Amino acid sequence: MSRGLLTTTVGSFPKPDYLAQARNEFSLGKLTREQLAELELKSTAEVIRLQEDVGLDILVDGEMCRGDMVAFFAGEEGGRTIEGMKLGGLVRSYGNRYYHKPIITGKLTWPGPMTLDMWRYAQGLTDKPVKGMLTGPYTMVDWAFDEHYGDRTQAVLDMAAVIHEEAVALDKAGAPYIQVDEPAATTRFDEMDLVSRGLSIVTQGLKAKTVTHFCYGDFARVFQQIVDLPVGQLDIETANSDYDLLELFRGNRFDKELAIGVLDVHSHRVETVEEVVAGIRRGLEVMPPERLFIDPDCGLKTRTWDEAAAKLRVMVQAVRQVRRELGID
Amino acid sequence: MLTTVVGSYPKIPDRPHPPKLRSAIARFDWGDMAADELRRVEDEVTVEVIQEQAEAGVDIITDGQIRWEDDQTYFARRMEGFSIDGLIRYFDTNMYYRQPVVEGPVRWRESAVAADYEFAKIQSPAPVKALVTGPYTLAALSADQHYGSLRDLTLALAVELRNEVLALEKAGAPIIQINEPAILQQKQDFPLFRQALEMMMDGVRTEAHLYTWFGDIDGLYPQILELPFAAIGLDFVRGPANWDVIARQPFTKKLGLGIIDARNTRLESVDEIVSAVRRASALVAADMTYVNPSCGLEYVPREVAQAKLARMVQGVRQAQEVPA
């Protein structure tokens, strides 16, 4: 592996057409859960092959069996449900899009491994490291209704204990990286302490390298708290905001690894190598290459398979060019 | 003491009931349905949600904002000067709206809501109030590329949205409600807020209500009582400090008492509602109080919304039957 500018992705990959179709048929009762599971394994293998083929350094299983990153742990078909959670009725998220919003109905308890089998399967297909992918406790609680706790702090702390058990299971199985995503963290900056407390419970005692992904936000207000987050790597969206967040890291103490997004996952357009090279150079202005990781802004599941592949190829090509310039290829 | 709602109502029911509006919009977006056909489905669903609110026993209802994609674009799309951009989070909810972008001078062309009001009035057994997103909130939640200051944009919108208020007055709406949640997030803008609303409501004779949510009015009280509105709606769920704030000085307007959590599925008990209503009665006379959810009901599933309204009505009736 290179000595710097390691490449990875944030987690989700597009579901191949046959899988999207099978999920639809399953929801209509035309396919059994076992038949669907078989296709999930098939597509996971394809996601691993794609990442190897593109030349990424740190892989993911692509979340072929997950619909929504919270609902998967809260009653979604094919997921294993945290005790004390269930899926609620349909709520609109925007436009004409609706989702089953989970409900916390009781004391939150770990139901046994929820992601371990799929991680094992994916890691068994490759010699490259595969990240264990979890949703963080703050996001799990924020994106659910609460009929039990009536107190966000207690709900987040109990949820953190649940996610910790899952992280420990991945850790024991040998997952080299465990990523705990907190996209909801940037919703309310006055609760960053709670986000941090939750993550510290999740990551306590893990041997694996730990990562957390945050969505774009006004980080300046909480930069010190972000510096002190109890994870080894912070992963942020930067391409879709013209890399302005990087300015925060200039001259400020930040001793973690930083993963920066160089691909806009909400755009169909494939970036040029020059654009991505320029983005990587922006990152190198504030971080040394051995602590700078390169990835897309966010999960790739909203892109088509071909768009995702094309974007990742450009990303790897750009990284290789910069590595050559730095003499670290 | 009357019951009302703040505005939005869930657009589709839970499975296995058919999601009529969702299917219709999908077909419309694919080009498989004509605009007037979609309009008919919107009409149908509006009638359904009017009936659900009335069945729950709510005294003053809305059309459920069934035709609205969100509070911002419903007006911005019908005005000159706006384009509509990418998705952005609505306050700290998990609901997103497309952000209006101000690209030129804003100008009102036609009413967004007067025809909606006229339709709802005919269909509804209960009085229907009409809603307008306030100029401050519309300005604060848009991206300004033209005016260069929140102040200039807000005042320009106040002048233009005044036409919307006048159109509703002409249509005969008994109550016109102006929604201004954004002021609670940037209270230092109160002088601008006041100026804009005074301009917008100048000479309006219809009973006007001002509603806020997702916070409290600490720092805006009692000045907010000087604004030209008959009633002020407050969120006591996300803004529990409102209880103490309005106890400091007499509340001289009608109060919109937002005590039913419209962002959570947990159903309030009758006792909880009775106790909140009595707590408010110590501060504001019963005939000066409207009991309502904390904000629009679109944050919860349809069945939950209806259950919450029925429970609210039950609680208010019980609170009034037994003297405190």
Image (spheres, helix red, strand yellow):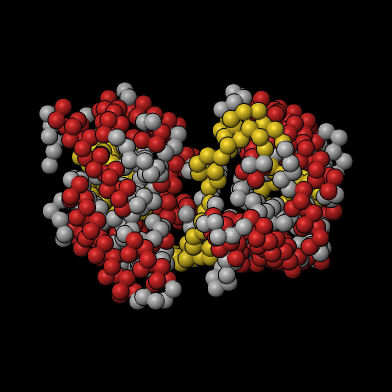
Name the residue: 87% across, 41% down. Answer: B205
Name the residue: 36% across, 26% down. Answer: A247
* Quarter occupied by residue A233: top left
Name the residue: 56% across, 63% down. Answer: B23
In the image, residue A209 sits, relative to residue B148, either above or below, namely below
In the image, residue B232 sits, relative to residue B264, either above or below, namely above
> Where residue A202 sits in the image (x, y, percent)?
32, 52
Name the residue: 72% across, 36% down. Answer: B108
**Image quadrant in which the C terminus of chain B is located:** bottom right
Question: Which residue occupies the foreground of this view, B201 or B273?
Answer: B201
> Where residue B263 sits in the image (x, y, percent)?
58, 55
Question: Which residue occupies the foreground of this view, A291 or A38?
Answer: A38
**Image quadrant in which the N terminus of chain B is located:** bottom right
Count the marks: 0
Residue B313 seen anywhere in this rendered image of the structure:
no
> Where residue A193 sits in the image (x, y, percent)?
42, 42
Residue B115 seen anywhere in this rendered image of the structure:
yes
The reply, left or right, for residue B315 in relation to residue A230 is right
Question: Which residue occupies the foreground of this view, B285 or B254?
Answer: B254
The reply, left or right, for residue A274 in relation to residue B126 is left
The reply, left or right, for residue A260 in relation to residue A188 is left
> Where residue B72 sits in the image (x, y, percent)?
62, 42
